Image (tube, grey):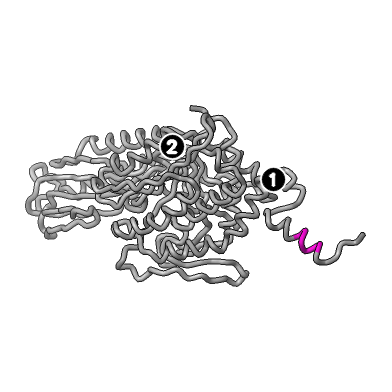
Amino acid sequence: MRPNKVTVRSLIAAALLLGGSSVAHAALSPAEKTIGATVEAGYEPSVGLLEKLVNQNSGSMNLAGVKAVADMLRPEFEALGFTVTWKPMDAAKRAGHLIAVHTGKAGSTRMLLIGHLDTVFEPDSPFQTFAREGDASGGDWARGPGVADDKGGVVTMVLALKAMQAAGTLKGANIEVVLTGDEEDSGDPVEIARADLVAAGKRADVALDFEGLSQENGKDMGSIARRSSNNWTLTTTAKSGHSSGIFSAEAGDGAVYELARILVAFRKELPEPNLTFNAGLIGGGQSAAIDKDGVRIAVTGKTNIIPSIAVAKGDFRTLSEAQTKRVREKMQGIVDREHLNGTSATIAFDQGYPSMAPTEGNKALLGKLNGINRDLGLPEMAALDPLKRGAGDISFVAADTDGLVGLGLASSGDHSAAERADLSTMKRQAKRAAILMSRLAGDKGRK
């Protein structure tokens, strides 16, 4: 019998609901099909939650605002059976972290889900509100502070967990969620600010990071690596005197030329694959004082006085801790090399975020995700070049567990008043995450 139009439309809708062809969907279990349907049904309510979160300012230094976002999310996790704790970070001069724990079947894979509550937009920013908007192609986009980074990622996480609960796969899952309140501007000392995250990483078999989805040429990419973020401060000193005597044996070469010697050597000798390094702030003269925030140098001097001090601040980013160690040693060697006449130099390092190397375990996780993509009828995701992704919280646990990054929303303009999120990516991202976690929950933990 020839099917009527209503039946045909129903079959097509059912296929689209799960994101691909009926042949691909044959590989999905009944529970995974329920996940797909739940994500679709939960999309609009999730966008509503995202709007609520975005409209609450939570700049990293707005401690009350960060706590307010945590309070909005607490009932979402508690309704799913998580035990929720707020961990204040007064000692690190930040708001704190939201930690939620779901205890499932003993011996199964222990999963750590990572996201953050804060944004780069403080209360004095003119960019404060959520606005939903389409585009020329009919897409579903929203603009707002943190709409992608990372409130969109956190909402995607919650939607995925709700889909697991509806499908019955959350019950046996061992999951710990850590939502930091200072990812955009980590507290100091970092050993305190990230102690809870590091401890969670040591307990976990797998870490899943819900920051933004990377795309290239319209294709979703998998992220299995993030580079470190290391800061350095270079200080040179010298004799001071009248500029008419510069370069003489008695007067010496001055602090600025010694600083220049070192920076030129960095540029010539440091380059290697996966390394970037930058001198972002420089000053020199009779005096050069860095402010308490480390973002300004107050300089005094005259054109006819040999500068007695010069300072440069910068960063370098690496793909592995071995590379970090090697680069630091090379930089130190250049600084310690024979100084220009009458000068001296020192360099101090401050590691902010460690690296997340592209390990075999991370590659295997991406392989699992691509198996899910095939089952959903979605294209496979190639590994993103780590040069195209900044540092992030997952790097603090990368030494202890396998990890995957980028389970949040695709976006553009992050960290600017042009930040926009592609809301439609929430659906496939939540399906991917929920099915991945469901399948991992059925695996035996390795610790």
Q: Is residue 88 visible?
A: yes
Q: Quadrant of the N terminus?
A: bottom right
Q: Which portion, as a residue range, is magenta?
A: 7-12
Q: Which circle, 1 or 2, is nearer the viewer?
A: 1
Q: Amino acid at mark 2?
A: Ala
Which disc is residue 398 wearing? 2
Query: Where's residue 195, x and y in %?
Result: 33, 39
**Relative depth, front residue between 371 and 117:** 117
Q: Say above or below: 75 vs 172.
A: below
Q: Which mark is residue 231?
A: none
Residue reaching furthest to the right = 1
The vertical placement of 395 against 220, above or below, is above
Left or right, 341 with reference to 349:
left
Residue 429: image x %, image y %?
57, 52
For the residues labelled 1 and 2, the Cα–Cα distance comes to: 34 Å
**Residue at disc 1, secondary structure:** helix
